[in-house]
Amino acid sequence: MSAAAIADSPLAAARRLVVKIGSSLLVDEASGQLRRSWLDAVGDDVARCAARGQEVIIVSSGAIALGRRQLRLPDGPLRLEESQAAAATGQIRLAHAWQETLARHGITVAQVLVTLGDTEQRRRYLNARNTLNALVRLHAVPVINENDTVATEEIRFGDNDRLAARVAAMVSAEALVLLSDIDGLYTADPRHDPQARFLPEIHALTPEIEAMAGAPGSGFGSGGMVTKLAAARISMGAGCRMVIANGRREAPLAAIESGERCTWFLPSATPRTARKEWIAGSLRTRGVVTIDEGAARALRDGRSLLPAGVVTVDGVFQRGDAVLVKDAAGRELARGLCAYSSDDARLIAGHKSHEIADRLGYRGRDEMIHRDDLVLS
Ligand code: GLU
């Protein structure tokens, strides 16, 4: 494939990308050992993306598969507390393996363990999102897994496909790669049905597509096509492109770029438009921020709302809640997610951003509503 075609690949075009790696790729099923040379080849692949300026976030499974061996747990299904014990042991080795492989390229790894609640509850979501944003800005590669040791049955993802999609949505990634032991989506299970047709591109998740998922797959990853399509739904809803690709080869990211067989799920929205639609449409506003003429001009020019331009703050809201932005005459100008609670917003209203730390006792964001979190009415 030509260089131009590679540059056109949704993978190469993504500024920020999430790569999910399943247990069955990382850990040898028979021996329970880490597949070191495969990991190193993926590490090279990730380093190549980072070197051309892409921000990469890894979601890696394998803690339970590695730990169960270490603890000499029997083959077959584990009880919940046994999986959690295995995860506690295996996660150390997993994180260490990622650290070692990326250190060969001078890349710093950050371990991030999340639970379902961290991606669902507003305050924890914002916290996780800010931390991940800070890490990638500092050129570290976050390696994420579910916090298996503390998550109980009801509050677990249980599979990293959906976890990876939530992470991709949370950080507004442009692409999500699910590396798997299958090369994409088929009309039926290709292992059993010779008529199964391969589907290279999906633009909408119709009931027919959902029906193609069939039963969860083999191997000791907890995924299968069902969780991959659930991930596709989350990802597409966030305007993030998703690809299911075969990880059973070296340098799988390079292979996707050069057009090797894989299934792309291509939403019509972008992460930016999907997020703006979400802010404009589906959030209940909890307060009103009234701003002066200078700030109103700044908003119309596409800039953020700074505390200095805020005249009054009405209502009771938490950090991250949606608020209305109005002018002095009471006209609605915009909607946005406020970076401060109503109490703190009142304390800094009318003040310069460099005064925030003195007024609140902590150093928050310079903007009261960042332009990425703001939609003009
Ligand atoms: N969090 C689990 C682990 O690291 C894996 C979940 C999955 O494979 O989807 O072992």
Image (spheres, rainbow, N blue to C red):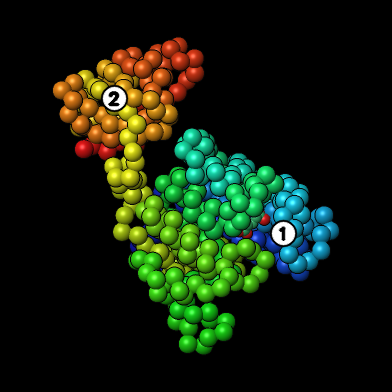
Q: What residue type is labelled 2?
A: Val
Q: Nearer the viewer, mark 1 or mark 2?
A: 2
The residue lying at 52 percent from left, 48 percent from top is: 57
Height in image: 196 above or below 112?
Answer: below
Mark 1 vs mark 2: which is more N-terminal?
A: 1
The image position of residue 373, as x and y in percent, is 34, 36
Number of numbered markers: 2
* Vertical arrangement, residue 123 with respect to residue 362, above or below: below
Q: Name the residue located 75 percent from the left edge and 67 percent from the top edge.
A: 76
Camera-nearest residue between 322 and 163: 322
> Cβ(mark 1) to ligand 1 < 8 Å?
yes
Residue 304 in the figure: left or right of residue 95: left
Q: In this figure, which residue is indicated by the disc labeled 2? A: 289
Q: In which quarter of the image is ligand 1?
A: bottom right
Q: In which quarter of the image is residue 377?
A: top left
Q: Determine whether the residue tagged by mark 2 lies in a helix, strand or loop.
A: strand
Give me the residue at 47% from left, 20% from top: 363
- Report the front residue among 78 and 305: 78
Residue that carries the numbered disc 1 in the rendered image: 65
Instruction: From the top left corner, tell me how far across and down residue 98 is, in percent.
Output: 65, 49
Question: Gap in Å between the C-alphas at discs 1 and 2?
Answer: 51 Å
Please state the horizontal and vertical placement of residue 332, each as a whole percent of the image: 20, 31
SS under mark 1: helix
